[in-house]
Image (spheres, grey):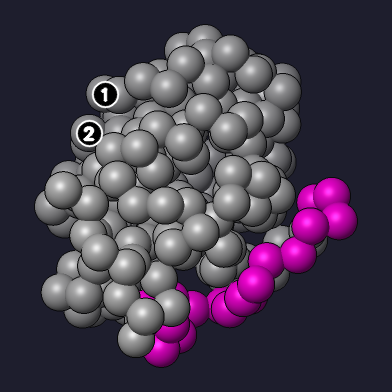
Amino acid sequence: MPPLSNPSRHYDAVIFDLLTALLDSWTLWNRVAGSEEAGLRWRREYLVLTYEAGAYRPYEDIVRDAAMNTDISASTADTLLNSWGSLALWPEAKQVLDKLRKRVPVGIATNSSDRLAEIAVRAAGGRFAAVATAESAGFYKPRPEPYQQAIERLGVPPNRILFVAGSAADVPGATGVGMTVYWHNRMNLPPVDDVSPRYTEGLLSPLLDLV
């Protein structure tokens, strides 16, 4: 049975973007690429390809295509994929998650394959009430399907869910399905479209004042 709405709380559930909002994937990409500049160039191309993909095609292929499009070798892309288990939470994330889980269900919506999502969820400590992937939803964010799958698996109305975005495109994507957005904009990324999040912070700790 879905949790009853609690008027003393702003939200009854939280859904995180996994690879940017909750995990520090930036450090891994930059390390494997050999520099921050190369990692950023590769990552930007990967984001463009996922946002343009629409219907799901293998996530691993998109990572490799983005590498080739930015003059990064296929072997480097394979090194990244084989290093997925070394993804780490942002420094304050574990404490925030531990406290949030005592208050509300916590879920994940990620642009990832099922296999890599399973690895990344373990890196994030597991124990999520719902996990939705681009592969299982059939489409990449910011299409609505991954968000909707996470919402359905949590069983909480979208207007009672706080979505924690990491990438700029998650802001209009999650807003479009009726969730309030907290943009964990740790890297000071520029916004996309003209949709503003309800909250923008450089850390995850302020979530504890909202949920």
Q: Residues within 10 Å of mark 2 (few under 14, many from 20)?
A: some
Q: Are marks 2 and 1 in contact (CB under 8 Å)?
A: yes
- Give the residue at x 37% y 61%: 14
Q: Position of residue 176 (x, y in %)?
A: 66, 45
Q: CA distance from mark 2 to mark 1?
A: 5 Å
Image quarter hosting the C terminus: bottom left
The type of residue carrying mark 1 is Arg
Specify the principal SS of the magenta part.
loop
- Give the residue at x 58% y 13%: 55
- Give the residue at x 64% y 18%: 54
| Vertical side of 64 occupied by 36: above or below | below
> Of helix, strand and loop, which one carries label 1?
helix
Res. 71 in view = no
- The one of 171 and 69 positioned closer to us in this rendering: 171
* Magenta highlight range: 192-211
- Give the residue at x 47% y 52%: 158
The answer to whether residue 209 is left or right of residue 178 is: left
The answer to whether residue 36 is left or right of residue 26 is: right
The type of residue carrying mark 2 is Glu
- The one of 23 and 14 positioned closer to us in this rendering: 14
> Of helix, strand and loop, which one carries label 2?
helix
Q: Position of residue 25 (x, y in %)?
A: 44, 50
Q: Within the magenta stretch, is there residue 197? A: yes
Q: Disc 1 marks which residue?
A: 115
Q: Which numbered dot is residue 118? A: 2
